[in-house]
């Protein structure tokens, strides 16, 4: 999915992860605007990567439990940028907030992702 829609991780900070995705033929719906599912794919990708970066990967791994998204504004060209920030980092679950903005820094989508933290066998 990441390769197919062209998601690129652009920045890793102490308490956030950023990535971009083009609004193009791969990510728009028939009306020519960013597909809600593409926004969710970006949000889940960023939150999932971020979640796995904060656990000891020799002992734990994280998988998605639930995601929701509110589509605030449409985008029909350019790039969108998502930023994932932790809302809760627990021993068995994590919750991440992901904001997606357009090139003018206008909010396009806000998402919340819940991750399960599992033991490696």
Image: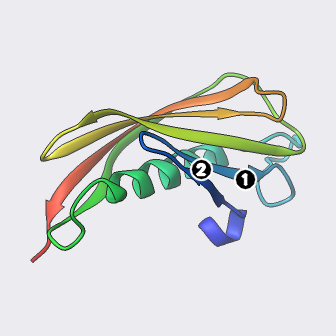
Compared with 67, 54 (above or below) is below
Residue 64, percent across and down? 33, 52
Count residues near mark 1 (Cα–Cα under 10 Å), then give few for <14, some for 14-19, many for 20+: many
Q: Is residue 98 above or below residue 4?
A: above
The residue lying toward the viewer, choosing from 55 and 30, is 55
Q: Earlier in the sequence, mark 2 or mark 1?
A: 1
Q: Which residue is mark 2?
A: 42
Q: Is residue 24 above or below residue 80?
A: below
Measured in 3D between alpha carbons, the distance from the residue under mark 2 to the one under mark 1, in whole angstroms, is 7 Å
Q: Secondary structure at mark 1?
A: strand
Q: Is residue 82 left or right of residue 86?
A: right
Q: Residue at x 36, y 58 (%)?
A: 53
Q: Which mark is residue 7?
A: none
Relative to 119, is 81 above or below? Answer: above
Q: Pointers 2 and 1 in contact (CB under 8 A)?
A: yes
The residue depicted at 79 percent of the width and 60 percent of the height is 26
Point out which mark residue 21 bears: 1
């Amino acid at each position: 999915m990441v390769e197919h829609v062209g998601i690129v991780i652009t920045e890793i900070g102490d308490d956030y992860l950023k990535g971009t995705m083009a609004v193009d033929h791969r990510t728009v719906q028939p009306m020519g605007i960013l597909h809600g599912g593409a926004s969710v794919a970006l949000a889940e990708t960023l939150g999932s990567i971020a979640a796995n970066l904060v656990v000891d990967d020799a002992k734990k791994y994280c998988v998605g439990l639930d995601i929701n998204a509110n589509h605030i504004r449409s985008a029909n060209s350019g790039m969108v940028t998502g930023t994932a920030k932790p809302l809760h980092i627990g021993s068995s679950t994590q919750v991440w907030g992901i904001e997606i903005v357009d090139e003018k820094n206008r909010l396009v989508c806000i998402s919340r992702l819940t991750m399960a933290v599992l033991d490696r066998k």
